[in-house]
């Protein structure tokens, strides 16, 4: 679960960036829960919108990042560039002379970092 300031902005980002769509939306008096998923996996992301909040959340130093794996990381980066989502540079991480990870980061509208990894090795 992550807390977001603007439901529509966040739903649009996660739809464009990762193909997630609203699976369920549960409204309470002081907050709303939005569950995002896709048909490919069992992954589900819960967004919480606290009603009446106008200030962005301080992400703090406990949060690191979310990570998702994709078949073609370079193609995903190009797709996100074309959508104006501002992905970071593609990074190649090697260990003992072998590819360990190929990835980039993109930030959602609330500043949460998401690592997008090439499916390879332990990241299948």
Image (cartoon, helix red, strand yellow):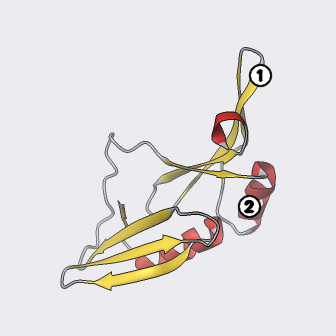
- In this rendering, the answer to whether 27 lies above or below 38 is below
Please give the name of the residue rendered at 31% of the width and 53% of the height, measured from the top-left corner: 58
Spatial CA span between label 1 and label 2: 28 Å
Residue at the left extreme, as displayed: 29
Tag of residue 98: 1
Please give the name of the residue rendered at 64% of the width and 67% of the height, measured from the top-left corner: 40
In this view, the residue in front, 64 or 98, is 98
Locate residue 86 relative to residue 72 in the image: left or right: left
Q: Which quarter shows the C terminus? A: top right
Locate residue 79 relative to residue 111 in the image: left or right: right
Locate residue 83 relative to residue 65 in the image: left or right: right
Q: Position of residue 33 (x, y in %)?
A: 33, 75
Nearest to N terminus: mark 1 or mark 2: 2
The secondary element bearing badge 2 is classed as helix
Q: Which residue is mark 2?
A: 81
Q: Quadrant of residue 110?
A: bottom left
Please give the name of the residue rendered at 70% of the width and 34% of the height, measured from the top-left corner: 121
- In this rendering, the answer to whether 48 lies above or below 90 is below
Q: Position of residue 27 (x, y in %)?
A: 28, 85
Q: Which quarter shows the N terminus? A: bottom left
- In this rendering, the answer to whether 85 lies above or below 21 is above
Q: Position of residue 71 (x, y in %)?
A: 76, 52
In this view, the residue in front, 99 or 41, is 41
The secondary element bearing badge 1 is classed as strand
Residue at the front extreme, as displayed: 42
The local crowd at label 1, few if under 14, some if 14 to 19, many if 20 or more residues have their Cα within 10 Å, is few
Tag of residue 114: none
Q: Position of residue 105 (x, y in %)?
A: 61, 48
Q: Nearer the viewer, mark 1 or mark 2?
A: 1
- In this rendering, the answer to whether 102 lies above or below 115 is above
Please give the name of the residue rendered at 42% of the width and 78% of the height, measured from the top-left corner: 7
């Amino acid at each position: 679960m992550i807390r977001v300031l603007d439901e529509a902005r966040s739903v649009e980002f996660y739809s464009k960036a990762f193909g997630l769509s609203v699976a369920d939306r549960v409204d309470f008096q002081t907050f709303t829960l939005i569950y995002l998923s896709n048909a490919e996996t069992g992954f589900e992301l819960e967004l919480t919108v606290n009603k009446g909040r106008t200030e962005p959340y301080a992400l703090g130093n406990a949060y690191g990042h979310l990570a998702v794996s994709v078949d073609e990381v370079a193609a995903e980066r190009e797709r996100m560039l074309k959508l104006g989502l501002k992905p970071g540079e593609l990074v190649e991480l090697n260990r003992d002379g072998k590819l360990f990870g190929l990835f980039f980061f993109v930030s959602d509208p609330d500043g949460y970092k998401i690592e997008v990894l090439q499916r390879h090795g332990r990241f299948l």
